Structure formats: structure tokens, C-alpha cells
Amino acid sequence: MKFFVDTADIDAIRRLNEMGMVDGVTTNPSLIKKSGRDILEVTKEICDLVDGPVSAEVVATDYDQMMKEGRHLAQIAPNICVKVPLTWDGLKACKTLSDEGTKVNVTLCFSPNQALLAAKAGATYISPFIGRLDDIVLDGMELIRDIREIYDNYDFRTQILAASIRSANHMKEAALIGADVATAPPNVIEGMVKHPLTAAGLDAFVKDAADAGIKIV
């Protein structure tokens, strides 16, 4: 499973990229706002930093303006993936942009039917939102399972990009189900390394090494 980092924080992206933990980056207007920077400037910097796709989201809701914004974003760098909402206008923009050779990430997916439409429209990625479904007491992972089965039934090339990831457990479940990609905040990816038995075992080894006077160099 590929890891995308869901942030516009350059330092966090650089830190994870140096560890080989970044296959791509996803951003949205909320993350751009949090960064406090100009969308075009910070997106260009992210594209220069990573080799994989960088999702940059349109803010328009009608087809014509989405196309203007999408084409403008696509000019930032070759690895831009234009993100559009899962609306009829968004699907129409997805089809046009995809036909033009631009990668497209269709976001805010909450049902298998929506995912099926996005695949038919030529989406590069579909972004089902796991955490937001969990928030309303639905099973976000069930949506991933359903989309995986539908896409496999018909050999759709659209990749499942599990989004709204809230925990390391979400990452594990997405990987088990067969999501192609999971996008998560930096703290979630970094938190995957933690386990109480690892910490306890390391403490014991360090103590025993000190007691025995063990030195390597």
C-alpha cells in the first residue's frame, strides 16, 4: 500500500520523505489555510520536494470554473493531481481533465455508487472518507471493501485512496482490505511505529546493556 501524507506542512513532508514514507501528498483548502501560505506557492514547493503525485484541490463548484482552476493547477508541475468533489459537475470535470492527460483525484466519496461513477469518469484516484463515516456511526472500512470488490469485478484502473484516516488501526485495516493508497496526517504515519511491548523490550535491553557495561564502540 502506498502512503500519501495529508498535509501542507513542508517540514513534516520533508521529514517523512527522507525516511522513504512518502509516495505522494494530498492537500485541501483546510490544510492550505492551516499552512498560512499561498496555495500556488506551497503546492509548487511540495511538488519540488516529492516525486509522487500531489493532490491540489479546486475550490469552484461549477464545471466551467473547475476547469479553469484545474488547468491552472495542472500547470504547477508534472506531478500535480487535480482534486475535484464528487458532484455531477466534479465528475464532468474529471472526465475532461482525464481525457486531457491530467491525473484526477475525486474526493468526498461516501458510497459505492459514487465510487463507481468516478471510475466510469476516468478518475485516477477515488477518495472514500473513512473517519467521517465512523463519526456518524457507520463503518468506513465497509465502504473500502465494497469499492474494492466493485473495482476488481470490472478491472477498473481507478486507485482506492483511503482518506480521512484517524489512526494507525485505520492504516492497518485499509492495508488488509486492499486499498491502493492511504493518505494520513504525519502524526498518524509516525505513530504506526509505536507498540508498548517494543518500548518495554527496548527499556530492558538498554538497562541490561548498562548493567553489563556493554559498549560497541
Image: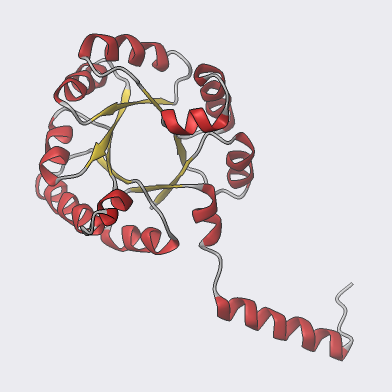
Question: Looking at the image, which residue is at 26% across and 18% down?
Answer: 97
x, y percent for residue 211: 85, 90
Percent position of residue 170, x then y? 37, 59
In the foreground, 181 or 110: 110
Of 24 and 51, which appears nearest the observer? 24
Q: Horizontal placement of 112 versus 73: left or right?
A: left
Residue 142 location, x and y as percent?
A: 19, 58
Is residue 55 visible to the viewer in this orientation of the structure? no
Above or below: residue 193 compared with residue 127? below
- Residue 36 lies in what quarter of the image? top right
Q: Is residue 217 rendered to the left or right of residue 66?
A: right
Residue farthest toward the front in the current orientation of the protein: 136
Q: Could you tell me which quadrant the C terminus lies in? A: bottom right
Q: Quadrant of residue 48?
A: top right
Which residue is at a point 64% across and 82% down the rendered structure image? 200
Q: Is residue 214 visible?
A: yes
User: What colour scheme does the image use?
Assistant: secondary structure
- Residue 7 versus residue 84 in the image, above or below: below
Give the residue drawn at x 57%, y 81%: 197
Total marks shown come to 0
Return the x and y of residue 188 as percentages of the image width and height: 49, 55
Q: Is residue 58 above or below residue 18?
A: above
